[in-house]
Amino acid sequence: MTTHNYFIQYHNADKLENFPTSGIDFNLPVSEITLDNKIQYDEWIYTSKRILSKAIGSFCFLIVGKTEQRIKNYYLWNYFRIEDSKEKNGFTTVYGTGQDLKKPVLLNNLPEFESFKKFCGNFGIGFQKIDNHPFSEMLVPYILENCFGMKTNKEMELISRLQQLNSKMKLSRPERRLIKLNAILRKDASIVNLLKEIAQYKCQFPDCNSIILTESGTNYVEVAHVKPIFKGGQSIIGNLIVLCPNHHKEFDLGKLSISEQRIEMLSGNLNGKNFTIKLIN
């Protein structure tokens, strides 16, 4: 199952005299760089940090620092999911699935960045966990825009609202007592309705074309929890999926096994049928 932890790795381009992506002219201004943003399994980090053993399954953002016109600029360069590691002589090589952003994102002028930079020890710590700082949630929409094609103002507005709600819902710890269930579901309504809108009121199960028109003219869909509330599941990105009523009931009552769960995708087997679902299109 996905942990919803975030880490960063810092790449000091000035000190190393190169960019983390090979084949890029170091003398180019970062604003003129366009990267290949295809998804790939690769070697992402080489570190001596012991915290790595607790990071398997988590997401890591790579931040690059480069001085340009006497100003130290910081860029969000790529993201990846930490999936494996190999240790040798006190150092660890980290492997995982991820991708470069097509256009690295300048972070300097974003809200909370200066606070975030201080939290990270001016990035002198290198590899570290960051999900205790609210800026970590601000990085996700830029990943969605650069890597998953969320480009329109409307889409980005929806994603921004979703991230704000997601941050609040992470603070909610569902009680397992049935008496609390209705109150929990009422509190979930905002993020549930927003996910339906982002999914364009379509079932996210592959090849499902279910249409149940409502009086308002929208298609009727429901939102299911991959890990149920009564088992401690939260109403957060990665644990919510938009489904038609039939697939919702099949998820609840059928033979379900999850093989991989990330913020943006879910794969597994439902009643003998393998599936891969893009949670955010």
Image: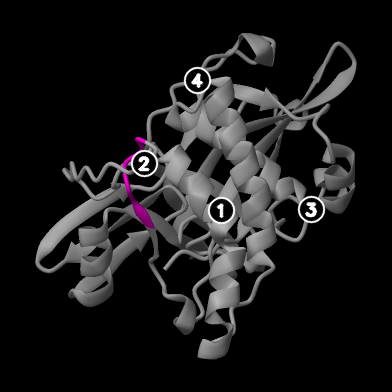
Q: Residue at x 49, y 28 (%)?
A: 150
Name the residue carrying label 1. Answer: 191
Disc 2 residue type (three-letter): Tyr
Q: Is residue 5 visible?
A: yes
Secondary structure under the numbered disc 3 in the rendered image: loop
Kindly report which numbered mark, 4 or 1, lies closer to the viewer in this rendering. 1
Label for residue 35? Answer: 4
Question: Disc 4 vs disc 3: Cβ atoms closer than 8 Å?
Answer: no
Q: Which residues are magenta?
A: 217-222
Disc 4 residue type (three-letter): Leu
Label for residue 125? Answer: 3
**As drawn, is 95 to the left or to the right of 176?**
left
- Nearest the camera: 82 or 224? 224
Question: Disc 2 vs disc 3: Cβ atoms closer than 8 Å?
Answer: no
Name the residue carrying label 2. Answer: 201
Looking at the image, tell me whether mark 4 or mark 3 is earlier in sequence order. 4
Q: Residue at x 18, y 65 (%)?
A: 270
Looking at the image, tell me whether mark 4 or mark 2 is earlier in sequence order. 4
Mark 3 closeness class: few <14, some 14–19, many ≥20 residues within 10 Å: few
Secondary structure under the numbered disc 2 in the rendered image: loop
Is 29 one of the magenta-colored residues? Answer: no
**As drawn, is 203 to the left or to the right of 177?**
left
Q: Measure how far apart labels 2 and 1 are at the Cα level.
A: 14 Å
Q: Main secondary structure of the magenta part?
A: loop
Q: Residue at x 75, y 61 (%)?
A: 132
Looking at the image, residue 270 lies above or below residue 102? below
Kindly report which numbered mark, 4 or 2, lies closer to the viewer in this rendering. 2
Q: Residue at x 65, y 67 (%)?
A: 51
Q: Locate residue 17, reporting x and y percent.
A: 70, 24
Looking at the image, tell me whether mark 1 or mark 3 is earlier in sequence order. 3
Q: Quadrant of the N terminus?
A: bottom left
